[in-house]
Image (cartoon, rainbow, N blue to C red):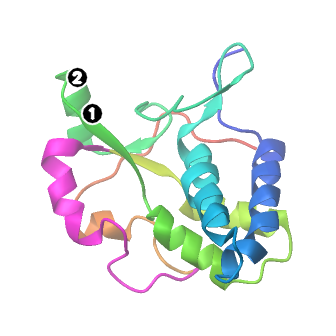
Amino acid sequence: MEKRHFSKAEQLWIAGEIEKLLPIARDSSHAASPWADHLIGGAYLWYWTADGINAKGKVKRDLFKRDTAFLRHTPAALSAIKRGKKVTHEHAVPRKVLLEHLKSEKWGSPSEIRTFLDRFCFGVIIDKELEDPQLKPWKQKMPTPFSANSDPLERYQWAKIKVREPKYVRSE
């Protein structure tokens, strides 16, 4: 067995956990609302982009964090890796934006959440030194108001940063 992204069943489980937490996250008067926000934005959305199943069949934190064969990346990031320079994994759509959208919508099922996350929640590896400053104006927001019709790569387009597709794409 080689390393792999989470399967559809594993993604549906994550989406189901998010669905359970959303009512608490939406209710700012609930004592656990900050915890729900943290679990969704700080854990589950991170798992979705950077984690995977290793060759031993175990969940591995940050398995794909800097793997350009499995994650979208910029040409500058690829060059930086080859030169031993620092790169950064970031969410194409910032987690804060994803969390707010998840909380603002009424989801009918984990499958709907999975479809949303599959479209908008993915990592992009960038050259930390060169491209991080270019993206600074949109570090935690999108250039235009976010909606289900937004382009998940809009921040990179505004910053004039080209994003390459990975060699291996997620499969069902």
* 3D distance between C-alphas at marks 2 and 1: 6 Å
What's the residue type where badge 1 is placed? Leu
Residue at (59, 78) in percent of width and height: 101
Disc 2 to disc 1: CB gap under 8 Å: yes
* Quarter where residue 6 is shown: top right
What's the residue type where badge 2 is placed? Lys
Residue at (60, 67) in percent of width and height: 34
Residue 160 in sight from this viewpoint: no
129 inside magenta stretch = yes
Give the magenta range. Answer: 126-148
* Horizontal side of residue 98 vs 172, given as left or right: left
Residue 163, compared with residue 140, is above or below; it is above
16 inside magenta stretch = no
- Residue beneath disc 2: 82
- Residue beneath disc 1: 78
* Quarter where residue 51 is shown: top right
Residue 128, compared with residue 44, is above or below; it is above
